[in-house]
Image (tube, rainbow, N blue to C red):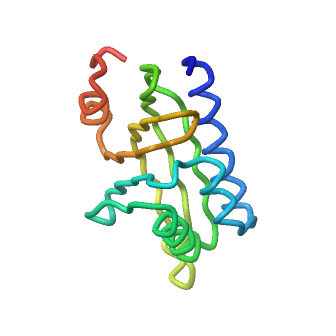
Amino acid sequence: METSANLDVVRSMYAGFGDLAGGSADFAAYVDSHYVAECEYMPVEEGTAIVGREAMIGWNERWFEAWDELTADASVLEDLGDTVVTEVAVSARGTGSGMEIDQLFFHVIDLRSGKIQRIREFLGRQEALAAAGASEAA
């Protein structure tokens, strides 16, 4: 798959995530259209990998239940072909608590056959770039 096609997949995934934040609640359709069935996501707050379609749907449902307001703005740092590194700025306000967060996350996204196979999440830019095998000059 061409690099530009993988970037389109990644951009579409983030756009879909934004749609979910905007109130679209079709989590199964979101996961099915962007991820391979045996996908894996390793968010920093979980401490363990979320593996497979059903687990991804459940994680997305729990994630969006936690927030009254949520925005996630992503930008591409490195395009390495079948791996893309992104920076994601998340701003949110907690459901019930009203607690506000602003946090930067860095995703290392591995793609296969036009869908996302794995996302590894990091809090540091250099750590994400190193995990992806990218240069630190990006």
Whether residue 50 sits left or right of residue 60 in the image: it is left
Whether residue 69 sits left or right of residue 62 in the image: it is right
Residue 54: % across, % down: 51, 69
* Relative vertical location of residue 45 with respect to residue 83 in this rendering, above or below: below
Residue for point 64% across, 65% down: 28
Residue 19: % across, % down: 72, 55
Residue 69, quarter of picture: bottom right
- Total marks shown come to 0
Residue for point 32% across, 45% down: 122
Residue 80: % across, % down: 42, 20
Q: Quadrant of the C terminus?
A: top left
Whether residue 93 sits left or right of residue 21 in the image: it is left
Residue projecting furthest to the bottom = 96
Nearest to the observer: residue 45 or residue 2: 2
Whether residue 122 sits left or right of residue 56 in the image: it is left
* Relative vertical location of residue 87 with respect to residue 15 in this rendering, above or below: above
Residue 53: % across, % down: 51, 62
Q: Quadrant of the N terminus?
A: top right
